């Protein structure tokens, strides 16, 4: 992280967004420090994109206050737009313009002086492997190429804070991995990043995350800290009849959730059970199991304990 990591780049208190009687975001509090990747994790409809649009000044909150880079939003949204970058979930550049034409247009929108424009366009084309594609129409590019172009335009004016809304939802796993390496390069260069995702592996890459459900923040913190504090231990079971074992375990004391992953059943046992593996071995439901062992939790386990099934 940068030496200014103690600085606050986003501060929101009591953030609410209502559409008629529907609460898209309900009472959101956020504190995001400089020099980190902060993620919103949640399913579609959980309020991630609505929250991000309020932070960027594109939506006016129904209630609550927002400060981004020390500016009040949405009052100072016009000033803020030159200090932030925003990459939307859907590709929003011009398909009938070439890569270079799109970059030139966005450089004009951001007010880059002509003396710097050519230099910056050359830099981002080189960094994001677009130089050989500079005369390619954006509408003729692959998903990974469009993603790189969208990121290049979002950082063209060297923003202090970058907002990315589901940036990898339409690309292959290799492009996703490479994209995240590029994000960490940006952080090393002093950029702070806010990203929305529904991919658990991506959320684990973030320095901190907010788990969203039905417009509310259910958990907030570093992924490892959330795993340590989730209130459950994880046990995996191998053997025959895993579907029957799951069905019989659900709803019994000490069992928070159970889900089959391939040839194993992953069971969340509340942390008031002193030895969760022995606890399951002694239960009649697991008779015939060939392996029962405690394993490391992951972020999906945190998500289950913080939302829906685990909160009932």
Image (tube, rainbow, N blue to C red):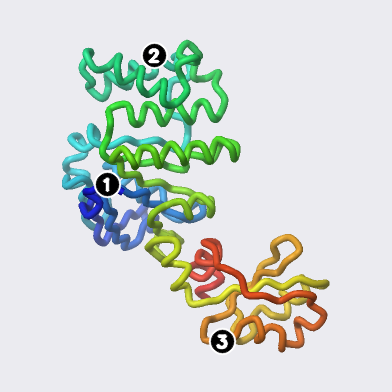
Query: What element does badge 1 sit on?
Result: loop
Query: What element does badge 3 sit on?
Result: loop
Mark 3, other Cα within 10 Å: few <14 / some 14–19 / many ≥20:
some
Which residue position is annotated with label 1?
A: 2
Cα–Cα gap, marks 1 and 3:
42 Å
Cα–Cα gap, marks 2 and 3:
62 Å
Q: In the drawing, does residue 108 fall left or right of residue 241?
A: left
Which residue position is annotated with label 2?
A: 101
Cα–Cα gap, marks 1 and 2:
33 Å
Closer to the chain start, of discs 1 and 2, is: 1
| The quarter of the displayed image where residue 170 is located | top right
Closer to the chain start, of discs 2 and 3, is: 2
Q: Foreground residue, 30 or 122?
A: 122
Is residue 149 at all visible to an observer of this figure? yes
Q: Foreground residue, 92 or 249?
A: 249
Which residue position is annotated with label 3?
A: 273
> Looking at the picture, how far across and down is residue 185, in whole percent?
39, 38
Image vertical order of residue 253 relative to residue 297, above or below: below
Q: Nearer the viewer, mark 1 or mark 3?
A: 1
């Amino acid at each position: 992280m940068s030496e200014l990591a103690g600085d606050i780049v986003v501060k929101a208190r009591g953030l609410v967004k209502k559409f008629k009687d529907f609460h898209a975001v309900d009472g959101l509090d956020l504190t995001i420090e400089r020099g980190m990747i902060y993620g919103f994790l949640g399913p579609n409809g959980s309020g991630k994109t609505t929250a991000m649009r309020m932070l960027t000044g594109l939506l006016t909150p129904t209630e609550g206050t927002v400060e981004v880079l020390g500016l009040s939003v949405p009052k100072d949204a016009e000033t803020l737009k030159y200090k932030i970058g925003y990459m939307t979930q859907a590709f929003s550049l011009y398909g009938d313009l070439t890569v270079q034409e799109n970059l030139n247009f966005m450089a004009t929108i951001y007010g880059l002086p002509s003396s710097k424009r050519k230099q910056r366009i050359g830099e981002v084309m080189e960094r994001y492997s677009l130089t050989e594609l500079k005369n390619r129409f954006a509408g003729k590019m692959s998903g990974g190429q469009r993603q790189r172009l969208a990121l290049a335009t979002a950082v063209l004016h060297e923003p202090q804070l970058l907002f990315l809304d589901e940036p990898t939802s339409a690309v292959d796993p290799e492009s996703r991995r490479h994209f995240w390496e590029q994000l960490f390069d940006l952080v090393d260069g002093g950029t702070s990043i806010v990203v929305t995702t529904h991919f658990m592996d991506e959320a684990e890459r973030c320095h901190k995350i907010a788990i969203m459900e039905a417009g509310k923040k259910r958990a907030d913190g570093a992924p490892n800290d959330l795993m340590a504090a989730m209130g459950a231990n994880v046990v995996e079971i191998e053997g025959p009849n895993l579907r029957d074992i799951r069905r019989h375990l659900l709803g019994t004391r000490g069992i928070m959730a159970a889900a089959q992953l391939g040839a194993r059943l992953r069971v969340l046992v509340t942390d008031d059970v002193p030895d969760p593996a022995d606890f399951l071995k002694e239960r009649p439901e697991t008779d015939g199991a060939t392996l029962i062992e405690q394993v490391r939790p992951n972020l999906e386990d945190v998500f289950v304990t913080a939302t829906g099934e685990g909160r009932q």
